[in-house]
Amino acid sequence: MGNLTRPKQPMPAFVREALKTHGLEDAYNARPPYQRNDYLWWINDAKRDDTKQRRLSRMLGELRQGHGYMGMDWNR
């Protein structure tokens, strides 16, 4: 379940900075590897910067709340 099915995605600097600024690095790292990779794929795949920011905001909100995964139900 923790195995990645997509190629490993790079973490953009703006995502790393947002996690640090919001104090959510530990919450991000506590997620399974496939979720961390999918979040990055989802953000990286957006064509427009405003879409990337909207997706980043969603990820940060889900990490802050401790549940949810790209708009789907997920509890630790």
Image (cartoon, rainbow, N blue to C red):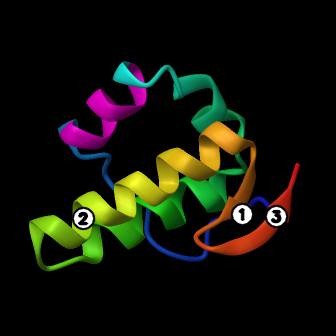
Q: Amino acid at mark 3?
A: Trp
Q: Are marks 2 and 3 in contact (CB under 8 Å)?
A: no
Q: Is residue 33 left or right of residue 21?
A: right
Image x and y of residue 37, in percent: 51, 59
- Secondary element under disc 2, as helix, strand or loop, is helix
Can you give x and y, in whole percent of width and height, for residue 2 in the image? 77, 59
State which region is magenta. Answer: 14-20
Which residue is tagged 1? Answer: 3
**Residue shown at 62%/52% (left/top)?**
62
| Disc on res. 74 | 3
Find out whether residue 15 is within the magenta segment: yes
**How dense is the environment of label 1, judged by Cα within 10 Å: few (below 14), some, or many (20 and up)?**
few
Taking 38 as reference, is 14 above or below it? Answer: above
Of badges 2 and 1, the one in the foreground is 2
Q: Residue at x 36, y 55 (%)?
A: 56
Q: Residues within 10 Å of mark 3 (few under 14, many from 20)?
A: few
The residue at which mark 2 appears reads as 52
Q: CA distance from mark 1 to mark 3?
A: 17 Å
Helix, strand or loop for disc 1: loop
Q: Amino acid at mark 1?
A: Asn
Q: Looking at the image, is 42 positioned above or below residue 68?
A: below
Q: Earlier in the sequence, mark 2 or mark 3?
A: 2
Query: Which is the main secondary structure of the residues drawn in magenta?
Result: helix
Viewer-nearest residue: 23 or 38: 23
Pick out the residue farthest to the left.
Answer: 48
Quarter of the rendering containing residue 29? top right
Residue at mark 2 to residue at mark 1: CA–CA distance: 25 Å
Q: Residue at x 40, y 59 (%)?
A: 40
Q: Earlier in the sequence, mark 1 or mark 3?
A: 1
Of residues 1 and 15, which is closer to you in this image?
15
